Amino acid sequence: MSEVAHYRFPPSQAYPLNRCLYALKSDPAFIERFLADPVGATTEMGLTEGERADLRRMDRDALVARGAHPYLVFMAGLRLKMAAEPGALEYF
Amino acid sequence: MLVGAFAVAHTPQLLIRPETEDRDLVLRVHAAMGRVKRRLQELEPDAIAIVAGDHVEAFFLDAVPALAVYVGRECAGTFGPYRYCLAIHEPLARAVVEQGIERGFDLLYTQDAKLDYAFYVPLHFVMPEPARPIVPLHVNVYLPPQPTPARCHAWGAALGEILRARPERVALIASGGMSHFPGTDRYASPEFDYDRALLEQLREGRGRELARVTGEELDKRGNIELRTWITLLGAVGDVRADVYCYEPSWHHGNAVVEWPLPGI
């Protein structure tokens, strides 16, 4: 079992990254902008080049190591995946 | 008065099922939620107070409340293609925030925050007909530092007293749980044995022991959302739980539970 907490205090230097992940999770207009122009959309959010690269690969461990909130990484990744390949979903 | 108490899983895969989710399991959880709906129908509540942890939807890092009460006319949100808007029981919501503050709980209140799916998913399945107004009660579970289990239990105890003294018939629902680790390397390995032991404890009416669990323990066990249950346990006391279902999926322990209240 991991000795480190799964959910940790979000460090302030990761605020732009978390804000970007939050927008990917919850702002459909931002997802569209991101899909059309990932560099422009993430620059607008104030992401560093390294953060942008990790986000492009959706490298969870790297993003979390930078201070991204795991849940935001998870949901942002899920939303992008659903936008790319809607797949078979059953709605109740 | 408090007429009913339930805990209901809110896993989004119960609402929007991807192919990776066992359909039969999802339907079994739906059946348990259907039982809650029928119970609510019998209990005839005037309002449903629902305790849930916002999933960084209404409250991002611009402001992180430990405890919050929705007190507007209505509350709305979206999840995937779902657009929902639910009426709030305004007099009850206002009484909860005013009396909660009187009792020493520094509650945030909002007349405009978005309503997270953690509130919506259980209500989608258990809302009786006709729909009842709700009182959404947020407990911070995802953004550390979260309120301690002891604090959640104390808030729940105060909430229970407030609700019992009200003229309305109120059903209380805790949303979420049990073990899951979204976004972490533990996603595919929740602690189902921990959940089962916990449910046994609740069946024996030993809910108040959860007030002594540490936040660190909840994080380790994938049970940070149990704060919503612990809040409810503060309100219901030593009532024995009736576990409608415990369905562990590959990533989540889904439970639906009732605490049948004596004298109701």
Image (tube, coloured by chain):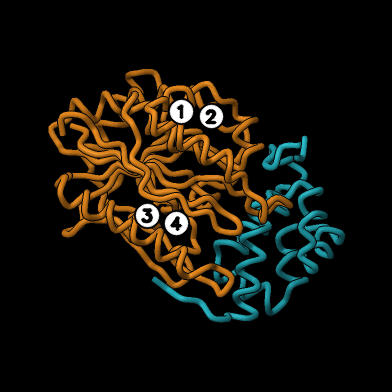
Chain colours: A cyan, B orange
Circle 3: residue type: Pro
Residue B75 vertical placement versus B95 (above, below): below
Question: The disc numbered 1 marks a residue on which chain?
Answer: B
Q: Are the residues tagged 2 and 1 within 8 Å (C-beta)?
A: yes
Residue A69 place in picture, x, y as percent: 68, 49
Crowd rating for badge 3 (residues with CA inside 10 Å; few <14, some 14–19, many 20+): many
Circle 2: residue type: Pro
Q: Which mark is residue B147?
A: 2
Q: Earlier in the sequence, mark 3 or mark 2?
A: 3
Residue A62 falls left or right of residue A23: right
Q: Where does label 4 land, which residue?
A: B117
Q: Earlier in the sequence, mark 3 or mark 4?
A: 4
Crowd rating for badge 4 (residues with CA inside 10 Å; few <14, some 14–19, many 20+): many
Identify the residue at image location x=74%, y=71%.
Answer: A40
Same chain for labels 2 and 1? Say yes or no.
yes
Same chain for labels 3 and 1? Say yes or no.
yes
Q: CA distance from mark 3 to mark 4?
A: 9 Å
Circle 4: residue type: Tyr
Residue B1 place in picture, x, y as percent: 18, 32
Q: Where does label 1 land, which residue?
A: B152
Crowd rating for badge 1 (residues with CA inside 10 Å; few <14, some 14–19, many 20+): many
Residue B145 place in picture, x, y as percent: 62, 32
Q: Where does label 3 land, which residue?
A: B122
Residue B165 vertical placement versus B48 (above, below): above
Element assignment for label 4? helix
Q: Earlier in the sequence, mark 4 or mark 1?
A: 4
